[in-house]
Amino acid sequence: MNRFLQVFYIFFSAAMLSLAIPNELLHFGSPAAAMLALIPLYFAYTNFSSYKQAALLTGLHTMLVHLMSSFWLAFFKDFAVFTLGASALGTGVIGAVAGLILYSPFHRYKKHTELRIYASPSYCAFIPFRILWFCTVYVLYEWMKSTGWFGYPWGTVSSAFYRWNVFIQIADITGTYGVTFLAVMFSAVLAEGFFIFLKARMNGCSISASQGFFHVCCVWTALFTLAFCYGASRYIKPMKPVKYLNTILVQQNADPWKEKNDNYTILLSERLTEEKLEEAKAAGEQTDLIVWSEGCLKYSFPNAKNHYTYFPSEKPLIPFIQKTGIPFVLGGSYVQNHSPRKVINAAMLFDRDGIMRGAYGKNHLVPCAEVLPFSDIPAVSAFLKKTIGISAGWTPGDQYVFFDVPGRYSPAYKKPAVKVISLADEPRAAEEKEIPYVRISTPICFDDAFPDVCRPLAANGSEVFMNITDDSWSKTKSSEYQHFVISAFRAIELRTTLVRSTNSGYSAVIDARGNVLSDMPLFEEAALFCKVPVYKKQETVYLRFGNWLPHTAALFVTVFEVFMLALRNKNTEVSSERRKLVKTKKHHKK
């Protein structure tokens, strides 16, 4: 195939996929575009002529998608060279590896003509395997780019499907990768159908090709139908909360990077909080918890307690919390260790008396922005300090931390059949057990994009994800909505409520089906009172087995490669024996 046409396919596919992912024009993306976006990539893939071409073009595709969909990473303070440049390069490298895997079976076919598993009677008999291989490797690519220290789950096919809420309910079985697999398979099937049509028009089409294509179409139709039926059954199944947590979310829309101190942010947050408390009181509602966003406090705890007892001078923070008589979750920094100094990006719980009771440290830090590789090595630290002015970053949290917050029972709540009264309990503790406590976890910003963070939280007892985020630096709606749709999958996968309290958006309450119950507009000063539903905990397939689908894909690829390596060695030995036999016969004739 003409090289120019190959590159055109790559650019066209990348542009379509970027348009499918939530963007400035289509805020929640386009599922229809996502179903078609990889057809041009498939055209290019079926005509790769070498490992080099496969790696370069697939890497180019993944890098282009990253640059076009995550361009807003360039606004991350002064670190665009790391956040956008380094991440684009890393995504391209992962894409290149995926390209090598994609091309592997075809290289073996061309290089070892003895392996006629791919060859005639008709090369089209290879259609089912070619489609399956393409889908499997693409799922493997998305998994590789979305996990680990450098993981970046943005720019994935699944993130385009939030609007098809019934369809994405399969995430509680397969995670996001089942959605990706079916969408990519649709593109591959349509592309193969186009090939079959052209071949039939030109010189007829073999029966094996038609049958193979028909069987693949049947398989995709069956899988999609099952996914839709399952999603519909989960979507219409009644889900009644057993508890509620009346919560006020505060969206300051104030970029903390632009402020010398946090006085303005705190005073603004206090005003928004007071206004919403008055509204709730007028409506006859009591508030159980107040949540401010990530990084709203600049001074590090626990030493900052004295500072916030007197500042801001107009209305000090700690006395304000005491006056409300309501627990707060606030985003800030917490010093875990003074020598060497280790500071975590924290979500801190303050009780109704204004006492900080504990902190959760962000587990998955943004690589090359919040944390720098090898910065704990003195020589590396000195080099970083000299070149970019930073010698260290945040320290990742080393524990899963939960906060038990008093809530209230829902009308659907039923007391357990068994109750135990122990004399070992103090009277006050026995009384408090009658209060319906809600166990919340507080994944911070980037955390809620990673099942590897949220799944253990849910498995260890979290009833509500109370995410706090600051994406105000991105300055774009696409960034806010992309983060939202990626995190919404956690609610579906683990069948739990997700609350997002952000600096500038998208602040929302999401139920266990992924539906938005309440929200606030982007980039506006606002506060929201919401009755956060708490559902009875469920053990979903995904909660129990995690990313079993990409693991299966990795196993399939590995087994195939090992099998083909063994087959190649066997054929090589047979060919060697044949050459020896021919030489022996010639010698006897002489």
Image (cartoon, rainbow, N blue to C red):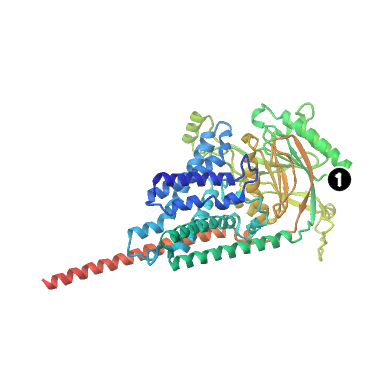
The residue that appears at 73% across and 60% down in the rendered structure is: 236
Image-based side of 523 in relation to 129, left or right: right
Q: Quadrant of residue 275?
A: top right
Tell me the amino acid under the disc marked 1: Glu
Q: Is residue 484 above or below residue 542?
A: above
Is residue 340 visible to us here?
no
Q: Which residue is at the far left?
A: 590
Residue in the foreground of this view, choosing between 291 and 515: 515
Taking the spot 30% from the left edge, 64% from the top edge, the residue there is 572
Comparing 502 with 342, the one in front is 502
Name the spot of residue 195 as percent of width and height, x first: 46, 57
Please name the residue shown 32% across and 66% down the image: 571
State how many labels appear: 1
Residue 258 position by quadrant:
top right
Q: Position of residue 205 (x, y in %)?
A: 43, 64
Image vertical order of residue 162 relative to residue 320, above or below: below
Residue 44 visible in the picture = yes
Secondary structure under the numbered disc 1 in the rendered image:
loop
Which residue is denoted by mark 1 in the rendering?
285
Q: Give the answer, above or below, for where 190 lies relative to 379.
A: below
Q: Residues within 10 Å of mark 1 (few under 14, many from 20)?
A: some
Quadrant (top left/top right/bottom left/bottom right) for the C terminus? bottom left
Q: x and y percent of residue 198 in the render? A: 45, 57
**Could you say where residue 345 lies in the image, as x and y percent from the top left?**
64, 40
